[in-house]
Amino acid sequence: MTLHAASRDALAAAELRLLEIVDSAKDSAALGKLGEELFAVVGLLSGQPSLRRALADASTDPAGREGLLRGLLAGKVSDEALQVLATVVTVRWSNPRELVDGVESLARTTLLVRAERDGRLDAVEDELFRLGRIIAGNHELELALSDPAGDPAGKVALVDSLVAGKVDETTKTLVDQLVREPRGLGVVSGLSDLAALAAKRRERSVAYVRSAVELDAAQQDRLEATLTRIYSRPIALHVEVDPSLRGGLLIKIGDEIIDGSVAGRLAALRRDLAS
């Protein structure tokens, strides 16, 4: 998510308010409810351009924007959600779309905090990544879930048939929202973004590792320790097997690629010979 300067400041203010509310939440169920309510508002604003423009109009009185919000949502969402959203609509956003982006970000943060408190953040991160790999490997499934003309309820039902009872509730909520309201994101790239957000929540970087053969737990631990030492920060591994590498590893961290695969070395050799 890329925000202009005013929107970055607005999101920071809204996040502070959110974290105050999150800190006082009674249990993880309350956080789950708050995250779902914020996602519902994303859906409302996405479908009503005139409303999001009115709520993001910095030329109007902030109290008037808050009054409009409360008139629409009082009694329909929790007091906690109203408090967060009141902050959202009384600060200045660069444009209406970025206001909606901000509400979506707040919803995701709420749910990831829930997973963190439940000791499930590692599992959620891994589930999001693995689901992304599964969908990326099934072209028909990816098309069905990414089709902008597809029925949102049908997409959610399709995802539920894959994950119901198999993943954490936070994972399911995040994925359901992604396919219901993709907002320009493909489902695979959206899942990758969500997994990266979960990793960032734990102040870690993500190393995407492709290996010619499956790595056992000890090998993954050694690789994680090595990368953590190299980069001087904790590194989370996402590993997938890719026999086309023929041997070795291909590691991508941010924009950096470490190619230790046989295929990569052969390609480099061919380039050298051709030059």
Image (tube, grey):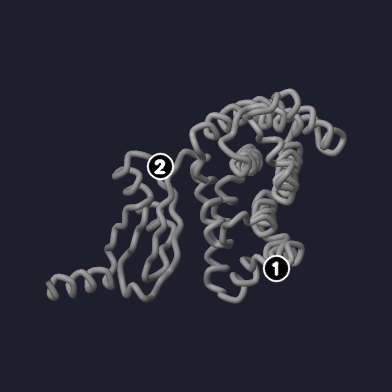
Residues packed near mark 2 inside 10 Å, few (<14), some (14 to 19) or many (20 plus) = some
Residue type beneath disc 1 = Gly
Residues packed near mark 1 inside 10 Å, few (<14), some (14 to 19) or many (20 plus) = some
In the image, residue 94 sits, relative to residue 245, either above or below, namely above
**Residue 212 in sight from this viewpoint:** yes
Residue type beneath disc 2 = Pro
Q: Quadrant of residue 83?
A: top right
- Residue holding disc 2: 234
Contact between marks 1 and 2 (CB within 8 A): the answer is no
Q: Residue at x 33, y 72 (%)?
A: 245
Of 26 and 184, the residue lying toward us: 184
Q: Position of residue 84 (x, y in %)?
A: 70, 31
- Residue holding disc 1: 150
Q: Where is residue 142 in the image (x, y as percent from the top left)?
A: 59, 70
Q: Quadrant of residue 269?
A: bottom left
Q: Distance between the residues labelled 1 and 2?
A: 40 Å
Q: Position of residue 19 (x, y in %)?
A: 63, 29
Q: Where is residue 43 in the image (x, y as percent from the top left)?
A: 72, 49
Residue positioned most to the front: 59
In the image, residue 196 sits, relative to residue 56, either above or below, namely below
Q: Residue at x 56, y 61 (%)?
A: 186
Q: Which residue is drawn at 71% across and 37% down?
A: 54
Does label 1 or label 2 sit earlier along the sequence? Answer: 1
Of 262 and 100, the residue lying toward us: 100
Of 14 and 240, the residue lying toward us: 14
Residue 257 horizontal side relative to residue 128, left or right: left
